[in-house]
Image: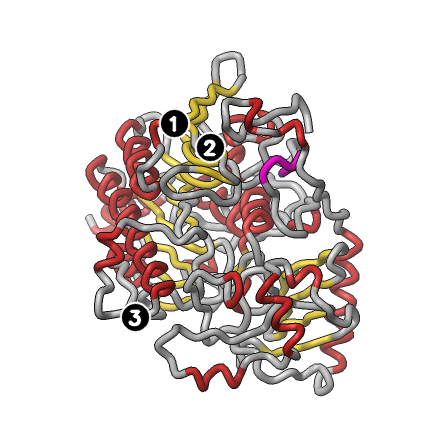
Amino acid sequence: MLLLLVFMVREALSVKPNIVLMVADDLGWADMPWHDSLAKAPTLTALAEAGTQLDRHYVQPICSPTRSALMTGKYPSRLGLQHDTINAGEPYGLMVNETLISNYMKDIGYSVHGVGKWHLGYCSWDLTPAKRGFDSFYGFYNGHETYYTKETHNFFDFRLDTLNADKSVNDDVIFGANETYSAYLYASQAARVISEHDAEKSPLFLYFPIQNVHNPNEVPDSYYQMYEGIVEDSKRRTLLAMITAMDDAAEVVVNALKKKGLWENTVFIFFSDNGGPILGIGNGQTNYPLRGGKYSYWEGGVRSTSFIYSPMMPPRGVNTQLLHVTDWLPTLTFLGSCGVYGDEATCSGPKLGDVDGVNQWGAIIGRRPSSREEFLVNVDQKANNSALRWKNYKLYKGNPGNGAWVPPPRINAEVFARQFTADKAERELYDSHHDYVFRGPYDAQKIQLYDVVNDPAETVEISKKEPDVVNFMLKRLEYHLARAVAPRNVPRDPKSDPTQFNGTWTPWLKHC
């Protein structure tokens, strides 16, 4: 009887799980309750505490690069997406010859849906989600927009896309979404996808890149009032209120899965696409005690608050294995092929080709160490900077971006004595230009090395003490530079003018 029970449990765990991949936008390292006790996010906190916090999970320093790495399993420098983001009306995107995680999940039998932000290009319909493996996509194409009016640069961007029988995109622009807070809409759509899902035919892969907490700082007043008398700084208060609204959206998704009877066979993953923006571009976020923030290569820009939870997995506390956003494609395709306790020796996911990510499922569930000891932070020929992580070390060549330590407002201002040692003119340049990391005055050959395991706040520069490490890591950067393609950024195309498309941002080219 015991053997039969063990067999039945193993059989259940080998079933393809439902997967929810929730990606927050611009969330700081120290913005969630497990790093800031003033934040209120009971649903996500409960999942993080009952699951596994991924303490050394790394992403790219900004939106489009992270999302391209997630979708393809490749470093953005190999895709030409390593420099800045894809902005509204720019005629390029994640190339159509790339196979995405949505395609792979579809191929291994999943129903695939996206709810939230795309930000991987939309100059032609071929670049949009419905053409790239998603059964449906509900949300916006651009990198940011208003939460109520759904506008990017004063024009509308909100839709439900599906694929017609003739493979054309059925683009339903939802003007009726105007004036409803977007987190409510995303939660309702995710719940609708779940309730309509036919679990007898396929498992569910739900990609949930929610808008919160990217600027602009907008939130219903009821959430803002939750922090009355708790947080005095208005920016920080609004930011935490937006986190609570995001948490309520997560609660709606979890409850919908439970109501549908899918929760017990679901894996729920949460992370931020980059660190929180700070100083002149900050909206109340903090990555403290990590250094730097969004747009920078410092830990505060690329170390992402993250966890994974499943009722099928025991809690494992804090996982310190080295993980990179490119790893999710091989990891989740393995999980979707082999189940939660699939044996890597006897089961494998689909053939993925030349990807940079590695299957980390065994490392996540505590079966073995991480499959990697290195990852490329970035190599950007246009900015003339690069960075690499290897073992304990992080090497910067050129300008890694603003390296300030920015604590929450309630921490004594004396902490700012630890601000990085830029001169006044350099700091003022950063405060007035969001793309300081790309254009600020800096020695392009300057080398900096830190032991980010023993010195996670990057306070002690050690390049002079570790010349062999520096030389090795510089050679590895040369290797990655040789594999990189030139940044593909191009200016906005006048033909994308939304006034030609009923006031909406929409694909405007046949091919791009």
Q: In the rendered view, does 208 fall on the left or right side of 90?
A: left
Q: Earlier in the sequence, mark 2 or mark 3?
A: 2
Q: CA distance from mark 1 to mark 3?
A: 36 Å
Amino acid type, residue under disc 1 in the picture: Phe
CA neighbours of label 1 inside 10 A, class few (<14), some (14 to 19), many (20+): some
User: Residue 283 at x, y = what percent?
Assistant: 44, 60
Q: CA distance from mark 1 to mark 2?
A: 8 Å
In the rendered image, the vertical position of residue 311 relative to residue 265, given as above or below: below
**Residue indicated by mark 1:** 175
Question: Would you say residue 485 sits in the magenta stretch?
Answer: no
User: What's the residue at 37%, 29% (across, down)?
Assistant: 202
**Which structural element holds mark 2?**
strand
Q: In the rendered view, does 363 fall on the left or right side of 424?
A: left
Q: Is residue 462 visible?
A: yes
The extreme top residue here reads: 166
CA neighbours of label 2 inside 10 A, class few (<14), some (14 to 19), many (20+): many
Q: Earlier in the sequence, mark 1 or mark 3?
A: 1
User: Residue 93 at x, y = what percent?
Assistant: 63, 37
User: Residue 474 at x, y = what percent?
Assistant: 76, 69
- The quadrant the C terminus occupies is top right
Residue stretch rendered in magenta on the structure: 88-93
User: What's the residue at 53%, 84% (across, down)?
Assistant: 418
User: What's the residue at 48%, 74% (across, down)?
Assistant: 406
Amino acid type, residue under disc 2 in the picture: Phe
Q: Is residue 264 visible?
A: no
Q: Which mark is residue 156?
A: 2
In the rendered image, the vertical position of residue 207 relative to residue 464, given as above or below: above
**Residue indicated by mark 3:** 232
Question: Would you say residue 91 sits in the magenta stretch?
Answer: yes
